[in-house]
Amino acid sequence: MTEELGLRARKKRQTAARIWQVAVDLCSERGFDHVSVAEIAEAADVSKMTVFNYFGTKEDVIVGPMEEHAEDPARAVRERRPGESAVAAARRQFLAQILGRDPSIGLSGDPRALKVRQLIKETPTLAHRVVIFHMRSVQLLADELAEETGDMLLARVAAAQLIGARNALIMQNHERTLAGDPLDEIAKDCAEAAERAFDLVEKGLQGYPGNA
């Protein structure tokens, strides 16, 4: 039974990946607004209903994999070491993601990841979804901090600063990747920039929210 469930899960992941790949290629070639869900389904050799079952909307097909990482900063704070500040935890997670060349922070050699960034840049509806994604990430982190401190206002201030630092670094990674800079060079520079960025945030959030 366990093996059967594992096989089923792998097949679902493979189907979702195939739908995403086909959608990115078609939308990149013809423009997001000029590709229908039916066309994506046909090219991926699945039914239109299957696409909706996996992703919900056409926008979800393109940006859904990225949005799975909205909770990353909140998880870093929730699982931080005893006595570790929120800034230190966020910094440690981000540096680990750089080391692992994590696509979610803009460090991917996959040509389709570049196509997604270009689509977001060219498509207002996708750009809007990214804004919502960032807002959700801030709120998830704020909720985590407020649960610990009891102060939602300061939690939102801290979350906005931490997510802002992450987003600035990620945006620079995307810009340099689209410009064709070598991935290893981008990662090296990002690690150095991350230290400076989180240092800057830490000066304003010294020790917040206190010992775990």
Image: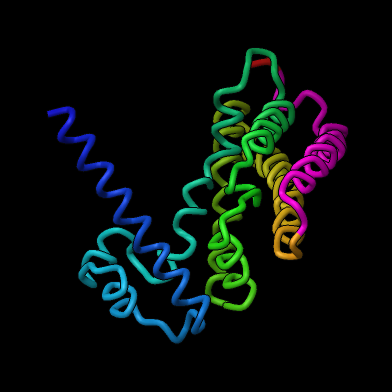
In the image, taking residue 82 as reference, residue 34 lies left or right, namely left
Image quarter where the N terminus lies is top left
Q: Nearer the viewer, residue 96 or 93?
A: 96
Q: Nearer the viewer, residue 121 or 188?
A: 188
Image quarter where the C terminus lies is top right
Which residue is found at the position 71% from the left and 64% from the top? 178
Above or below for 173 versus 88:
below
Q: Position of residue 37 (x, y in %)?
A: 33, 76
Q: Position of residue 136 (x, y in %)?
A: 54, 52
Q: Nearer the viewer, residue 145 or 122?
A: 122
Image quadrant where residue 23 sits: bottom left
Q: Is residue 200 magenta?
A: yes
Q: Is residue 108 magenta?
A: no
Q: Which residues are magenta?
A: 181-210
The majority secondary structure of the magenta stretch comes to helix
Q: Position of residue 11 (x, y in %)?
A: 25, 47
Which residue is found at the position 46% from the left and 65% from the top? 62
For this orientation, the residue located farthest to the bottom is: 34
In the image, taking residue 211 as reference, residue 133 lies left or right, namely left
Image quadrant where residue 179 sits: bottom right
